[in-house]
Amino acid sequence: MWKRVTVLWTVLRGDARQLWFALRHPAAPGWLKLGTALIALYLVSPIDLIPDFIPGLGVLDDLIVVPFAIRWLLRRLPPELKGTAGRR
């Protein structure tokens, strides 16, 4: 569990922060909000691609799937959101 929190903290410093600013933008598309909700649901869901009881491999899917999903969403942002996603 703590490994998951540590990895999420490192993601929060970068891509997740950009995603947060893009979500708060008034022109944020609905698919962005839905995709973010699905990522959050995957994080809290007990169902994983690789079960957590397998030592070492259980956390691996969270370490790979969540950052790639966030990056995938960020790459598909409209141009007007890409310029403001990282600013305060």
Image (spheres, rainbow, N blue to C red):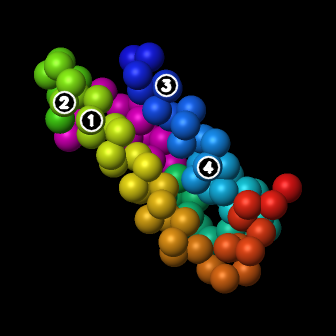
Real-space Cα separation, disc 3 to disc 1, in angstroms: 13 Å
The circle on residue 5 is 3
Real-space Cα separation, disc 3 to disc 2, in angstroms: 16 Å
Which residue does the numbered mark 2 point to in the structure image?
Answer: 57
Above/below status of 17 relative to 34: above
Count numbered badges in the picture: 4
The reply to whether residue 47 is visible in this rendering is: no
Real-space Cα separation, disc 4 to disc 3, in angstroms: 15 Å
> The magenta stretch spans which residues?
37-49
Real-space Cα separation, disc 4 to disc 1, in angstroms: 20 Å
Residue 49: image quadrant is top left
> Residue 19 location, x and y as percent?
62, 56
Q: Which tag is nearer the camera, tag 4 or tag 3? A: 4
**Which amino acid type is marked by label 2?**
Leu
Assign the magenta stretch its main secondary structure: helix
Q: Is residue 29 magenta?
A: no
Q: Is residue 46 magenta?
A: yes
Mark 3: which secondary structure? helix
> Residue 71 location, x and y as percent?
48, 60
Which residue does the numbered mark 4 point to in the structure image?
Answer: 14
> Residue 16 location, x and y as percent?
59, 49
Which residue does the numbered mark 1 point to in the structure image?
Answer: 60
